[in-house]
Amino acid sequence: MNDLPTIDDLWRFLPWGFALTVAVETPVLVIGLSRRHSLGRRLFCGMWLTACSYPIVVLVLPPLVWSRFGELPYVVTAELVAVGLEVLLFWLAFGPRGGERMGAVPSALARDLAAIVAANAASFLLGEALTAAGVW
């Protein structure tokens, strides 16, 4: 996709891209999130975080950024928005709570946030590889 995709193209791409993103990011989160999270929560995060960020990346940002500034600024903006939003949501949902011992939480939370960044990097790299191969 070197040219700006149409809104119809974006809607057609959304379910496939979402499914692939969840398939790539969820295993990274299952392995990478700290032990303070159950397997169920790790699996939930694989779906939930992508469900919150992906529609913005695929449907909102192309007309706002790609159409005005080009593909590279869109890609950079989309990745920063996705990671930033997912980290923020995770922090709000699972960050330190009142009464928790602060000694153990920061290292676990740092690991959690690094896992989110790694999951996004993995899906980004696969998407770039598939784009380069002409899959989409």
Image: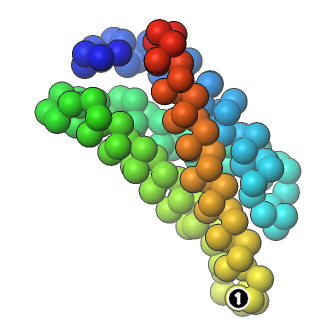
Asked whether residue 72 is in view, the answer is: yes
Q: In percent of the image, x 85 and y 50: which residue is there?
A: 39
Q: Give the residue furthest to the left.
A: 68
Asked whether residue 47 is in view, the answer is: no
Question: Is 47 or 127 nearer to us in this picture?
Answer: 127
Residue 5: name its quadrant. Answer: top left
Question: Is 114 or 96 nearer to us in this picture?
Answer: 114
Q: Is residue 23 above or below residue 4?
A: below
Location of residue 87 in the rendering, given as x and y in whole percent from the top left corner: 53, 59
Q: In percent of the image, x 80 and y 50: which residue is there?
A: 31
Q: In percent of the image, x 74 and y 89: which residue is there?
A: 103
By what rule are the colours in the image chosen? rainbow
Quarter of the rendering occupied by the N terminus: top left
Q: Is residue 89 above or below residue 13?
A: below
Residue under circle 1?
A: 102
* Numbered marks: total: 1
What is the crowding at mark 1: few (fewer than 14 residues within 10 Å), some, or many (at least 20)? few
Q: Is residue 49 above or below residue 65?
A: below
Q: In percent of the image, x 25 and y 19: which residue is there?
A: 4
Q: In the shown orientation, is residue 55 left or right of residue 61? A: right
Location of residue 119 in the rendering, given as x and y in whole percent from the top left corner: 63, 45
Q: In the shown orientation, is residue 28 left or right of residue 135? A: right
Residue 108: name its quadrant. Answer: bottom right
Q: Is residue 130 above or below residue 38?
A: above
- Label 1 residue SS: loop
Amino acid beneath label 1: Met
Question: Is 2 or 100 nearer to us in this picture?
Answer: 2
Location of residue 99 in the rendering, given as x and y in whole percent from the top left corner: 72, 90
Q: In the shown orientation, is residue 4 left or right of residue 40? A: left
Location of residue 117 in the rendering, given as x and y in whole percent from the top left corner: 57, 53
